[in-house]
Image (cartoon, helix red, strand yellow):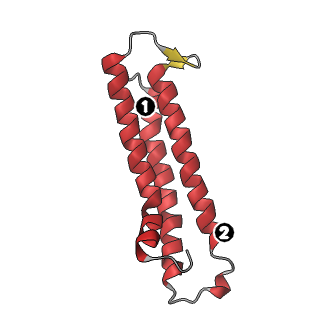
């Protein structure tokens, strides 16, 4: 996060929440389309279509946020090189905390869609 412009830093800080929001929309979109347009008994990988698609979307979102988390944890180098008043320290902390929150939120949205029938 060193020497980036404000818009780039701000977008990086919001990235975990944007991934969660996109996942939220995709899960509800999948369930809506599958319930409205898919014939009964449609399946993918041996699972009902909505469960398979939501599972794929959830795994992709979890992976993306995990990458953001790892990059934030290992991206700033040794803590001794960043001063206490350095705004990069806050940005890094925010991405770490946001990634943890987004991982929980993605699971919170994905698990019910995987456990409960889509159109039931």
Quadrant position of residue 10: bottom left
Residue corresponding to mark 2:
74
Quadrant position of residue 117: top left
SS at circle 1: helix
Residue 120 visible in rendering: no
Q: Where is residue 6 drawn, in percent x and y?
A: 42, 76
Q: Residue at x 43, y 49 (%)?
A: 20
Q: Residue at x 52, y 72 (%)?
A: 93
Q: Nearer the viewer, residue 3 or 97?
A: 3
Badge number at residue 8 = none
Which label's residue is closer to the chain start, 1 or 2? 2
Q: Residues within 10 Å of mark 1 (few under 14, many from 20)?
A: many
Question: Which image quarter is the C terminus in?
Answer: top left
Q: Where is residue 36 drawn, in percent x and y?
A: 30, 19
Q: Where is residue 42 drawn, in percent x and y?
A: 46, 13
Q: Residue at x 53, y 72 (%)?
A: 92
Residue corresponding to mark 1:
113
Residue 54 visible in rendering: yes
Q: Nearer the viewer, residue 116 or 98?
A: 98
């Amino acid at each position: 996060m060193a020497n980036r412009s404000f818009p780039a830093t701000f977008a990086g800080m919001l990235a975990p929440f944007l991934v969660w929001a996109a996942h939220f929309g995709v899960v509800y979109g999948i369930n809506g389309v599958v319930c409205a347009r898919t014939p009964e008994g449609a399946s993918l990988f041996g699972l009902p279509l909505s469960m398979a698609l939501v599972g794929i979307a959830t795994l992709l979102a979890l992976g993306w946020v995990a990458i953001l988390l790892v990059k934030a944890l290992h991206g700033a180098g040794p803590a001794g090189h960043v001063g206490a008043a350095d705004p990069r320290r806050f940005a890094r902390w925010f991405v770490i905390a946001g990634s943890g929150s987004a991982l929980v939120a993605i699971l919170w949205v994905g698990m019910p869609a995987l456990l409960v029938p889509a159109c039931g």
